[in-house]
């Protein structure tokens, strides 16, 4: 069963290892890997993300190191 989450805000993400880049979810424009810090503080590289998909993973950082996915759009309610 798909869960629909309404997003009221969409903004292009600038990947940064240090800046706050918080979002409730993100859309991947060009597939690849994305290094993130979740809201719980877990650092993880998400491998094999697919272009055109929304990933409902709340993050505090979208990092540039080890990330190959591009054209990331941050989504928030």
Image: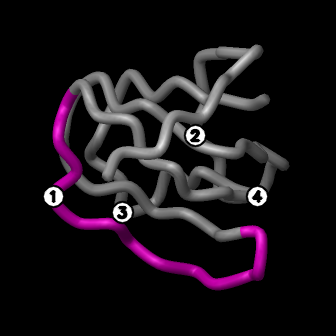
**Disc 3 to disc 2, how far (Cα)?**
11 Å
Residue 7 position within the rendered picture, expressed as x and y whole percent measured from the top left: 68, 22
Image disc number at residue 66: 3
**Disc 4 to disc 2, how far (Cα)?**
11 Å
Marked residue nearer the N-terminal end (1 or 2): 2
Q: Nearer the viewer, residue 69 or 8?
A: 8
Residue 5 position within the rendered picture, expressed as x and y whole percent measured from the top left: 60, 35
Image disc number at residue 15: 2
Task: Nearest to the eye among marks 4 and 2: give it.
Answer: 4
Q: Is residue 33 magenta?
A: no
Q: In the displayed image of the protein, which residue is found farthest to the front? A: 1
Q: Nearer the viewer, residue 47 or 52?
A: 52
Q: Residue at x 51, y 34 (%)?
A: 4
Mark 3 falls on what kind of element? loop
Q: Residue at x 30, y 23 (%)?
A: 29
Image disc number at residue 60: 4
Image disc number at residue 73: none
Marked residue nearer the N-terminal end (1 or 4): 1
**Disc 1 to disc 4, how far (Cα)?**
20 Å
State yes or no: discs 3 and 2 in contact (Cβ < 8 Å): no
Magenta segment boundaries in residue numbering: 39-51
Marked residue nearer the N-terminal end (4 or 2): 2
Residue 13 position within the rendered picture, expressed as x and y whole percent measured from the top left: 60, 27
Residue 10 higher or lower than 6, as above or below: above
Which residue is label 1 attached to?
A: 48
């Amino acid at each position: 069963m798909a869960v629909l989450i309404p997003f009221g805000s969409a903004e292009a993400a600038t990947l940064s290892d240090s800046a706050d880049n918080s979002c409730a979810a993100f859309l991947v424009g060009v597939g690849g890997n994305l290094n993130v810090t979740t809201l719980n503080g877990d650092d993880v590289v998400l491998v094999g993300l697919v272009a055109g998909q929304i990933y409902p993973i709340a993050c505090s950082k979208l990092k540039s190191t080890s990330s190959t996915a591009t054209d990331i759009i941050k989504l928030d309610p």
